[in-house]
Amino acid sequence: MAKTVLTNVRAFAVGVDLTSVSNKIEITAEVEDKEATNYGSQGWKEVLGGLASAELSGEGQWEAGDPSKVDDGAWATLGGTGPWSVSANNSAAVGELAYLMNALRADYKVGEAVGEVAPWTSTAKSNWPLVRGQFAHPPGTARTATGTGTALQVGAVPLGKRVYAALHVLSVAGTTPSLTARVESSADNTFAAPTTRLTFSAATAGGGQIARTDGSAITDTWWRVAWTVTGTTPSFLFAASLGIQ
């Protein structure tokens, strides 16, 4: 990706699409530096990497009155943890760069002076690692039946690393609708004999989930999201992201 002017950052907070109500999204990751200077350091400080952490901060225009709105979503998740996925100035299409993490919504602020557009600001702090991955399902494609997503060559998983996957259910319609999403892997892009690596709980309303594998090595290099949809005239809009960390 070349140098870019930020005009199309996509941000998904649990079950809310923040894209059209945000004008600033920042992600920071840091590792504590722990001093390890000793008499053999030749007069220079030595440091070791300590605990790592990540933080996402955002701000934008306040809206309320529906679970898909920023105010409703923020109040529902304040003090709780859930998935966040942010694009790198792209449309969140399958295969495009995504940053994802499981994070605590640590604060939420609303209000301004008279005459100003009502704003919001909020911060989410990581509970799991910040993962640099890819979008595995686009937010604007409605799913009304069981299916599988596009194959992505994400790579093999070394021992001690994990696959992390986030699911953001943005809207739900129909009678008794249910969406059960899963992450599958395969040795090649045919997915002739896929292996289910992660399965999300059945979703019947908007919301978000995040999951990860157990740290075992996985030799498969191809990955995709698949889903089972049930109900009468069901329809789901959802975004999904995954990566190895």
Image (cartoon, rainbow, N blue to C red):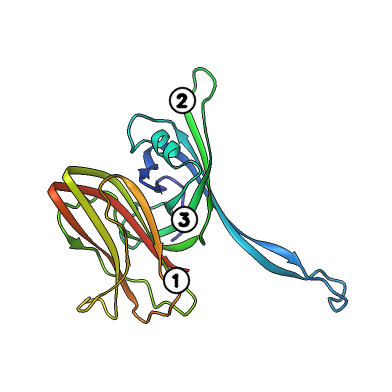
**What is the three-letter code of the residue carrying label 3?**
Asn
Reading the chain from its start, which is encountered first: label 2 or label 3? 3
- Foreground mark, 1 or 2, reads 1
CA distance for labels 1 and 3:
14 Å
Q: Quadrant of the N terminus?
A: bottom left
**What is the three-letter code of the residue carrying label 2?**
Val
Determine which residue is flagged by label 3. Answer: 102
Secondary structure, mark 1, is: loop
**What is the three-letter code of the residue carrying label 1?**
Arg
Secondary structure, mark 3, is: strand
Determine which residue is flagged by label 2. Answer: 117
CA distance for labels 2 and 3:
30 Å
Q: Residue at position x 42%, y 39% from top?
A: 76
Say above or below: 129 vs 159.
above
Q: How many marks?
A: 3
Residue 126 position, x and y percent, is 53, 54
Residue nearer the viewer, 77 or 116: 77
How many residues crowd around disc 3 within 10 Å: few (fewer than 14), some, or many (20 or more)?
many
Secondary structure, mark 2, is: loop
Determine which residue is flagged by label 1. Answer: 162
Q: Residue at position x 73%, y 65% from top?
A: 34
How many residues crowd around disc 1 within 10 Å: few (fewer than 14), some, or many (20 or more)?
many
